[in-house]
Image (cartoon, helix red, strand yellow):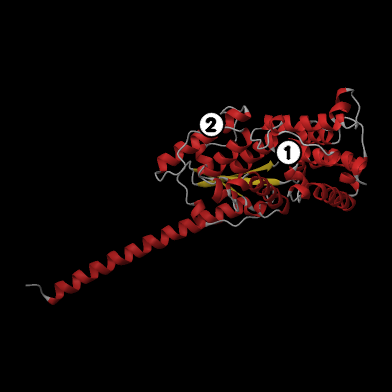
């Protein structure tokens, strides 16, 4: 039987233990707050100014542990947001047939499903992967196959790649942008490449705890093409294949329109749309987008048949072209029809049209427009 005095002693002991527990939690909380303050001071110091919103959980690090993240202010930079927007537009344009709609590249691309569909479409290959897998290990294996295929197509070794299975699955924005930029550089039309804003900079922060103190490293990553690459692409865009061969850069009205009079360019594009629609409507074809509808050669061939008033047998070209080579064949065949009609050989090369280069497509259609506008 316990006395009242003993009960009081037990209660006092419990109280002391509870008080000790509360003090320990308060101390741990204060230590966490101090770590946050150290990080903020280090980041906002005059010699390395960084404006970013830091979450306390990001700075509770073990000794020698390192965390990497993207500076929030650089995410909100208009150039960065526009760069991402243009990449998303390009992806959605390529995968519209598969009814895939990307809204957020971090959330929609991390599992490899969209990246797999994209490289299959761009490189005209078929990956041996399971479409849907529930296990984490299965998802990692699928992503590994997808990234391996992308690296192979881009001729990039794993050590050279700025992305890994872990970084893509971890929704690393920089890694995802890097792989999309590399794919765009290889496969996207030049018009898409040149629409990507230059000078977009994404800033990464590397935070490491050494001897109880946080060490912050800030790195700027310039998105898109380098200055030399951009200059090369721009020169290619304003030069046709013949002028490249003879070492000269011949310019025409379309160069001027694209560079100095975009408002007039829209008028010319609408005129060419109306011209093509007028003659192809007879076949039940509605023309509404030059860049998307004239890149495989089919409508160009049918248009030549209408303009010259003859039927072109289906065996002479690929009516449903799938591969890049089949589309090139169709366009070269259309160029032969243009030559047979007494017009000069089109300046652009077939590959430019297949790549949906709007300037090249407009050049070819304008050649037809000039001869048949009164028809």
Q: Where, by quadrant of the figure, is residue 296 drawn?
A: top right
- Cβ atoms under marks 2 and 1 closer than 8 Å: no
| Number of residues whose C-alpha sits closer than 10 Å to that of mark 1, classed few (under 14), some (14–19) or many (20 or more) | many
Q: Is residue 198 visible?
A: no
**Farthest bottom residue?**
4
Answer above or below: position of 363 versus 287: above
Disc 2 or disc 1, which is closer to the eye?
Answer: 1
Element under disc 1 = helix
Tag of residue 353: none
231 left or right of 131 in image:
right
Of the pair 118 and 313, the residue shown nearer to us: 313
**Residue wearing tag 2:** 148
Q: Residue 61, position in %: x, y?
A: 47, 48
State how far apart marks 2 and 1 are (Cα). Answer: 34 Å
Answer above or below: position of 6 versus 271: below
Of the pair 263 and 175, the residue shown nearer to us: 263
Q: Residue at horizontal 45%, vertical 41%?
A: 139
Q: Residue 256, position in %: x, y?
A: 91, 43
Q: Residue 104, position in %: x, y?
A: 59, 52
The quadrant the C terminus occupies is top right
How many dots with numbers? 2
240 left or right of 131 in image:
right
Q: Where, by quadrant of the figure, is residue 149 drawn?
A: top right
Q: Residue at horizontal 46%, vertical 56%?
A: 31
| Number of residues whose C-alpha sits closer than 10 Å to that of mark 2, classed few (under 14), some (14–19) or many (20 or more) | some
Q: Is residue 174 visible?
A: yes
Q: Where, by quadrant of the figure, is residue 138 drawn?
A: top left
**Farthest top residue?**
246
**Residue wearing tag 1:** 298
Element under disc 2 = helix
**Farthest front residue?**
310
The quadrant the N terminus occupies is bottom left
């Amino acid at each position: 039987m316990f006395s009242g005095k003993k009960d009081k002693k037990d209660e006092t002991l419990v109280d002391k233990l509870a008080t000790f527990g509360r003090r320990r939690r308060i101390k741990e909380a204060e230590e966490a707050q101090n770590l946050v303050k150290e990080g903020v001071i280090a980041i906002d110091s005059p010699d390395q100014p960084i404006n970013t919103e830091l979450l306390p959980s990001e700075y509770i690090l073990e000794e020698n542990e390192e965390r990497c993240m993207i500076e929030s202010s650089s995410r909100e930079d208009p150039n960065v947001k526009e760069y991402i927007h243009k990449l998303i537009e390009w992806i959605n344009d390529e995968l519209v047939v598969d009814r895939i709609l990307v809204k957020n590249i971090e959330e929609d691309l991390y599992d490899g499903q969209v990246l797999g569909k994209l490289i299959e479409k761009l490189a005209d290959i078929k990956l041996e992967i399971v479409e849907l897998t529930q296990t984490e290990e299965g998802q990692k294996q699928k992503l590994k196959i997808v990234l391996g295929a992308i690296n192979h197509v881009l001729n990039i070794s794993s050590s050279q790649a700025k992305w890994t299975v872990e970084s893509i699955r971890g929704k690393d924005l920089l890694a995802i942008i890097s792989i999309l930029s590399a794919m765009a550089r290889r496969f996207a039309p030049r018009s898409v490449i040149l629409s990507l804003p230059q000078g977009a900079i994404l800033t990464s922060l590397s935070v490491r705890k050494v001897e109880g103190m946080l060490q912050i490293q800030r790195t700027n990553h310039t998105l898109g093409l380098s200055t030399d690459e951009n200059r090369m692409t721009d020169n290619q865009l304003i030069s046709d294949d013949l002028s490249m061969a003879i070492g000269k850069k011949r310019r025409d009205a379309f160069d001027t329109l694209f560079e100095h009079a975009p408002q007039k360019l829209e008028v010319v594009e609408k005129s060419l749309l109306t011209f093509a629609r007028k003659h192809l409507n007879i076949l039940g074809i509605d023309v509404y987008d030059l860049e998307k509808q004239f890149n495989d050669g089919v409508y160009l061939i049918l248009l030549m048949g209408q303009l010259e008033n003859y039927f072109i047998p289906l065996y002479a070209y690929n009516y449903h072209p799938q591969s890049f080579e089949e589309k090139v064949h169709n366009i070269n065949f259309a160029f032969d029809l243009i030559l047979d009609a007494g017009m000069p050989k089109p300046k652009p090369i077939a590959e430019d049209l297949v790549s949906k280069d709007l300037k090249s497509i407009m050049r070819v259609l304008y050649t037809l427009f000039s001869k048949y506008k009164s028809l």
